């Protein structure tokens, strides 16, 4: 289903596009850019540094060091997304957050005043999130924030 049929054309607002890098993220970023072009919304790209996965590692790692490296990578990915939007005539903000993914998504929606969150649809077998898990995450975020979550 097209995003404009879900949201209604002309509903101006703010869109947050979560990004994590890779080909799937480029597709998601382009979909978010197209959405704000159609609707005249404001756009922010978001990267969340979440190192909770390190708790499951048996290796001796320093979470702070890993988080710092992920933050540097995230800043670079956000800059690339912002440049992609700019090349398509869309101004955008970039947001880099640290913490648990869902909590940071919800906090960002509230703080940025977003009415739409765009998440990338995982490619079959290539993502940490299965589509069903992502849909569950989206439903929970919608219930907590009243923002519409689109999986594109």
Image (cartoon, helix red, strand yellow):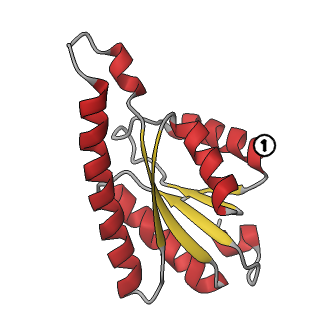
Q: Which residue position is annotated with label 1?
A: 143
Residue 152 image position (x, y, % from top left) = 53, 59
Residue 37 seen in render: yes
Give the residue drawn at x 41%, y 86%. 88
Q: Residue furthest bottom?
A: 89
**Is 92 located above or below residue 128 in the figure?**
below
Q: Residue furthest left?
A: 60
Residue 17 image position (x, y, % from top left) = 52, 61
Looking at this view, is 24 or 53 the one in front? 53
Quadrant position of residue 83: bottom left
Q: Residue 67 vs residue 114: left or right?
A: left
**Is 141 located above or below residue 26 in the figure?**
above
Q: Residue furthest top?
A: 58
Residue 141 image position (x, y, % from top left) = 69, 43
**Is 142 located above or below residue 90 in the figure?**
above
Q: Residue 134 vs residue 49: left or right?
A: right
Give the residue drawn at x 52%, y 67%. 44
Q: How many marks?
A: 1
Image quarter hosting the N terminus: bottom right
What element does badge 1 sit on?
A: helix
């Amino acid at each position: 289903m097209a995003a404009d049929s879900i949201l209604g054309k002309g509903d101006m607002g703010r869109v947050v596009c979560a990004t994590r890098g890779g080909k799937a993220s480029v597709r998601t970023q382009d979909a978010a850019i197209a959405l704000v072009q159609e609707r005249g919304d404001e756009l922010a790209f978001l990267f969340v540094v979440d190192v909770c996965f390190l708790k499951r590692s048996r290796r001796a790692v320093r979470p702070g060091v890993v988080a710092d490296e992920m933050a540097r990578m995230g800043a670079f990915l956000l800059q690339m997304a912002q440049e992609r939007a700019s090349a398509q005539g869309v101004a955008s903000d970039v947001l880099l957050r640290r913490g648990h993914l869902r909590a940071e998504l919800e906090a960002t929606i509230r703080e940025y005043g977003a009415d739409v969150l765009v998440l990338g649809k995982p490619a079959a077998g290539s993502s940490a999130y299965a589509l069903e898990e992502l849909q569950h995450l989206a439903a929970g975020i919608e219930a907590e924030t009243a923002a519409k979550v689109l999986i594109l």
